[in-house]
Image (cartoon, helix red, strand yellow):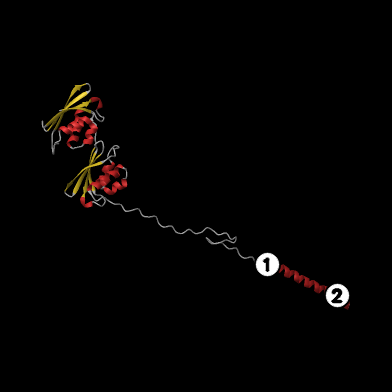
């Protein structure tokens, strides 16, 4: 019994020892599997676990520069010229800065597409204002009242008068337009209504233009060959002459084709 029992006890002890080692080994593997480091999330601009950096933060951009402050002419002529230039160019924002709301609306409502070759004719100072007239190549005329105390500031143009060149359909009215252009020194309009030689002849013959209120008579009679003879009478015989109007040209430019003193 002693030898057999001793052998049996030795085998049992060996089995217990082997079972403990297996348990320790299994526990070691389980502990190793559970010991992985937790995943980290890369912040903006930091390296990820793979070592590749994320997108870099952009530096703040400076705010856009403010537009330069508007400036305003300091003379009446320059102010009037700047106003007409803004209107001709369709710069309604600048036009609104230079005029009152009423004048701004008047400019916008001027009919048709006018020639844009505006030139200064004259400025007349009256009671704290200047009345500045500009004309284009066909004699269209605008007169702006510029208030002197607002020079160099917004909205100095406070009144507007517009006179557009027209081409009447009757000989008497056509001749009257020509004579009125002569009386106001509007040579571009005279050239739009008559042949150049007629304009030169009338300007040379009558250099003293009427002032203030004056009377104008125009009576037409047929002159044959498509002509209407319009007899001009200014201030009841002070100035008289005859204009020859081409009847087929009425309603168009340069219908006055002749002059007779």
* Image-based side of 215 in relation to 254, left or right: left
Q: Which residue is mark 1?
A: 32
Q: Is residue 231 visible?
A: no
Quarter holding residue 199: top left
Residue 226 sits in quarter: top left
Q: Which residue corresponds to the image point at 28% horizontal and 49% vertical from the top-left?
A: 97
Q: Can the viewer see residue 19?
A: yes
* Mark 2, secondary structure of its residue: helix
Residue 49 place in picture, x, y as percent = 59, 61
- For marks 2 and 1, give the CA distance: 38 Å
Of pointers 2 and 1, the one earlier in the residue sequence: 2
In the image, taking residue 97 as reference, residue 219 lies left or right, namely left
- Between 119 and 162, the residue placed more toward the observer is 119
Q: Residue furthest bottom?
A: 2
* Horizontal arrangement in the rendering, residue 17 relative to residue 225 (left or right): right
Q: Quadrant of residue 62?
A: bottom left
Q: Position of residue 186 (x, y in %)?
A: 21, 37
Element on which disc 1 rests: helix
Q: Return the residue at label 2.
A: 7
Kindly identify the residue that appears in the image at 23 percent across and 35 percent down. Answer: 189
Q: Where residue 1 appears, x then y in whole percent? A: 89, 77
Which label is found at residue 6? none
User: Is 254 located above or below residue 72 in the figure?
Assistant: above
Verify CB contact (< 8 Å) between mark 2 and mark 1.
no
């Amino acid at each position: 019994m002693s030898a057999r029992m001793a052998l049996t006890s030795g085998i049992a002890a060996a089995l217990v020892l082997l079972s403990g080692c297996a348990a320790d080994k299994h526990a070691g593997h389980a502990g190793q599997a559970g010991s992985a480091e937790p995943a980290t999330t890369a912040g903006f601009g930091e390296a990820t676990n793979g070592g590749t950096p994320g997108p870099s933060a952009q530096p703040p951009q400076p705010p856009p520069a403010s537009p330069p402050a508007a400036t305003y002419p300091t003379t009446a002529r320059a102010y009037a010229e700047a106003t007409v230039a803004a209107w001709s160019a369709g710069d309604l924002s600048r036009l609104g800065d230079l005029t009152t709301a009423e004048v701004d609306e008047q400019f916008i409502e001027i009919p048709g597409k006018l020639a844009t070759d505006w030139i200064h004719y004259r400025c007349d100072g009256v009671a704290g204002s200047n009345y500045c007239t500009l004309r284009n190549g066909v004699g269209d005329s605008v007169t702006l009242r510029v208030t002197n105390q607002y020079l160099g500031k917004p909205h100095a143009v406070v009144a507007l008068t517009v006179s557009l060149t027209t081409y009447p359909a009757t000989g008497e009215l056509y001749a009257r337009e020509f004579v009125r252009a002569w009386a106001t020194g509007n040579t571009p309009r005279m050239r739009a209504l008559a042949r150049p030689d007629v304009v030169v002849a009338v300007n040379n013959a009558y250099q003293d233009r009427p002032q203030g209120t004056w009377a104008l008579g125009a009576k037409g009679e047929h002159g044959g060959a498509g002509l209407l003879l319009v007899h001009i009478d200014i201030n009841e015989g002070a100035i008289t002459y005859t204009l020859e109007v081409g009847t087929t040209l009425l309603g168009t430019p340069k219908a006055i084709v002749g002059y007779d003193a």
